[in-house]
Image: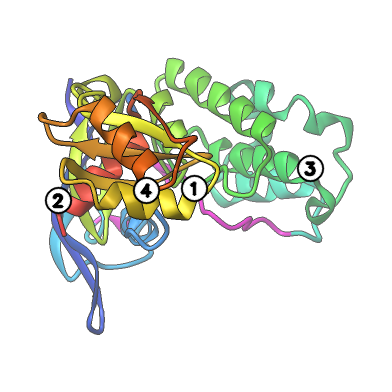
Amino acid sequence: MRNIIDIQGLTKRYGRLTALDCVTLAVPQGALFGLIGPDGAGKTTLYQILTTLLRPDEGSATVAGLDVVKDYRKLRAEIGYMPERFSLYPDLTVRENLHFFASLFGVDVKDNFDLIAPIFEQLKKFPNRRAGALSGGMKQKLALSCALIHRPRVLLLDEPTTGVDAVSRSEFWDMLATLKEKGITILVSTSYMDEAERCECIALINKGKILDVNTPGRLMEDMDKNLYNVSAKDMYPLLEALRALPDVKDCYTFGATLHIVTNDSFNLDNAVSKLRQAGLDDARIWPAKGNIEDLFIKLAKEDG
């Protein structure tokens, strides 16, 4: 399968800050590909280069066989872009926004309505409502519809589920799976680690560097080894006590518990005994199932 997005040694600096540091990445045609990383990792800068809004300082990138610098005019017709912030016109209605974006690409709404019909279903109930008055989930659906109205080959989504409720997030990912079945290549960025598992392949990015690229399953191999949950009533004293244990390599907050990464010589019973000697009588330790967040923390620390 050929790559529809090809990025080689891409670097972008803002003064002393290096937002992208020699990024090399390839996205296969027809893939649902995730770009996973925290705020400030460089995701938006990468998107702005891929959508021809920024020029890189070094390196190159092509999308659908078109260079992001040399072929920027042609490329804009091949991509659909949904930025993190709601970027439609709040004073225009649902219908007016859709027709406006269709006119920018020289198409009629009815030409490609079959593509957005499942997404637009709920919006049809209030076509004359101003976009600014829509709920977060409805704004999301309208923005996605406008990004797709010219039937792009590549859909670039920059943190599309930020600030959206859990139900709308799940519905959105279901929509992406449907679009993928229709042959559209999707590159979606997110800081929600749980969303990574919905992608076929993911790239982990931090401080402008790609940490690793693979399928979620391959990335998670061996992540359960030497990983434990730990809990107690007094969490801060627990954190300090765990970090003092000789066989604990790392310890960090994970939801309502702590996660510890240990050496092979770690003995669970001995660790519990030492915690109770430290006054943590209710301390519990049990094996944890690792996820993308654990992997990201591990790789980020190894990268320094």
Q: Is residue 144 above or below residue 85?
A: above
Q: Position of residue 59 (x, y in %)?
A: 12, 60
Task: Using a 10 Å C-alpha cutoff, classify the residue at mark 3 as few (fewer than 14 neighbours), some (14 to 19) or many (20 or more).
Answer: some
Specify which label sits upstream in the sequence, 4 or 3.
Answer: 3
Residue behind mark 2: 302
Query: Circle 3 sits in a helix, a strand or a loop, which is it?
Result: helix
Q: Say what amino acid the circle numbered 3 marks.
A: Arg
Q: CA distance from mark 2 to mark 4?
A: 30 Å
Residue behind mark 4: 278
Q: Nearer the viewer, residue 198 or 301?
A: 301
Of marks 4 and 3, the one in the foreground: 4
Residue contact at pointers 2 and 3, CB within 8 angstroms: no
Q: Is residue 213 above or below residue 97?
A: above
Query: Circle 1 sits in a helix, a strand or a loop, which is it?
Result: loop
Q: Say what amino acid the circle numbered 2 marks.
A: Glu
Segment tinted magenta in the rendering: 71-89
Of marks 2 and 4, the one in the foreground: 4
Of marks 2 and 1, the one in the foreground: 2
Q: Is residue 74 above or below residue 125?
A: below
Residue 222, by quadrant, is top left
